[in-house]
Image (tube, helix red, strand yellow):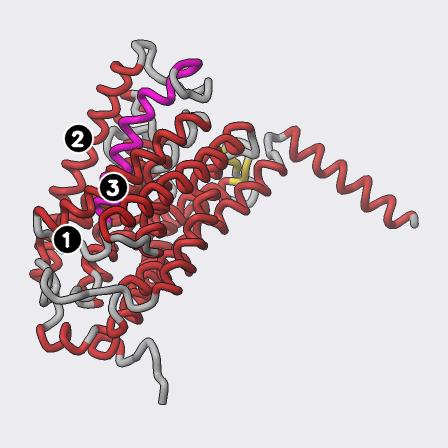
Amino acid sequence: MKKILFLTIFSLATSAVAAAEGLDTGDTAWMLTSTALVLFMTLPGLALFYAGLVRTKNAVSVLMQCFTIACIVSIAWVVYGYSLAFKGDGALIGDFSALFLSGIGRESLSGSIPESVFIMFQMTFAIITPALVVGAFAERMKFGAMCLFSLLWFTFVYLPATHMVWGGGFLANLGVIDFAGGLVVHLTCGVGALVAALVLGPRKGFPDSPMQPHNRTMVVMGAAMLWVGWFGFNAGSAVAASEDAGMAMLVTHISAAVAAFTWMVLDWLKQGKPTVVGIATGMVAGLATITPAAGTVGPEGALLIGLLAGGVCFYATQAVKGIFGIDDSLDVFPVHGVGGMLGIIMLSFVGTPGGFLGSGSSGIAEGGPLAQLWIQFQGIIVIFAWTAIVTWIILKLVGFVTDLRVSEESENEGLDVTEHEERSYDLT
């Protein structure tokens, strides 16, 4: 009994000391949970979602790409990524003061949480962003080229964008608002995907041959995991167990539900029947669009953003493939790129404190919505241009080292066998 009493007193005393030093155990617990949720979005969420959307002969290749990117980016993040993204005060990129996470120990804090938790949380964002780009070149990029491209893209696109917006770079100083990644994650992956699709060219048979998803059950499972994991993505970006995290979670769910339903209705009207792939894609559009605004809008604003996300992104997917003839295989640009830009723009209006559909706490520019809108547009222009130019250069450089695209024979047989000597389903 005395031992139990001693341990209880010791535990309370330890908690009190930690609180006095700035560590908040509630914030830490929430951020540990959020980190796990965001990693869950890529593995297995995004991997399953993408694998179900491609043809049977390429499902393993997509799973392998997502898994491999998680490994590559995790290593690079520890070696130099975190340092370049969040250390230093450069306008474009950070410094090398925390290479290999040097100087960061068990006791290091980032605000009210251990810095180790913040490092891991941000690592999960760094993992999913290049993994999203996979959807643009699915079924036709060589595995080795994908590995090199992803590492270079993470280094020269994602890290500068992160530092510019979240790491104290010039877009942050300009006043650009991007709560959880409309620019840093969704615009970069969307534009990167668009450029990759243009450089690699369409899949053999596009657009005449049917390229239907091979496993809609897998698509829905992956989409459901993304929906749940996105609560860590957005609500976790409050970096605290706070009222901001609570509102971010609420508006995230509202936008996803409204966008999914809107997409389903439009699909129903266009094709005569609602589809499960459509409703799942609409959900992702709603989540991508609310992401930059999750810290500024209220429930009413989330309803409007979800409605616009479902409609705008739906027609964007029709335009990219149908009008422009671009084979962005899994609609990365129209869903993530367009959705991210839409959310970045809309928060200027629906995020106004005490104003139209706002949540009451946002940091909107003193000049009001139009002043903030101009700031947001500058963020879009900079990130769009930087991503497009650098992605094109990276693809050309990778093309000098190795072939970007698999051979026609390999594409016909499928990347599962030709790149990995494995099959998605072995019924023998």
Q: Give how far apart the Cα atoms at labels 2 and 3 are.
A: 19 Å
Indicate which disc, 1 or 2, sits on the residue closer to the N terminus: 1
Residue position for label 2: 381
Q: Is residue 333 magenta?
A: yes
Q: Closer to the camera: disc 2 or disc 3? A: 3
Q: Measuring 44% from the left and 36% from the top, which residue is drawn there?
A: 254
Q: Measuring 40% from the left and 31% from the top, which residue is drawn there?
A: 303
Q: Is residue 357 magenta?
A: no
Which amino acid type is marked by label 2? Answer: Ile
Relative to 27, 325 lies left or right = left
Q: Measuring 39% from the left and 39% from the top, which residue is drawn there?
A: 258
Q: Using the rendered view, name the quadrant where residue 290 is placed.
A: top left
Instruction: Work out whether 309 lies above or below 170.
Output: below
Q: Give how far apart the Cα atoms at labels 3 and 1 are.
A: 20 Å
Residue position for label 1: 196
Secondary structure under the numbered disc 3 in the rendered image? helix
Residue position for label 3: 313
Residue 420 % position (x, y):
26, 76
Magenta-highlighted residues: 332-355
Which amino acid type is marked by label 3? Answer: Cys
| In the foreground, 99 or 305 | 305
Q: Which mark is residue 283?
A: none
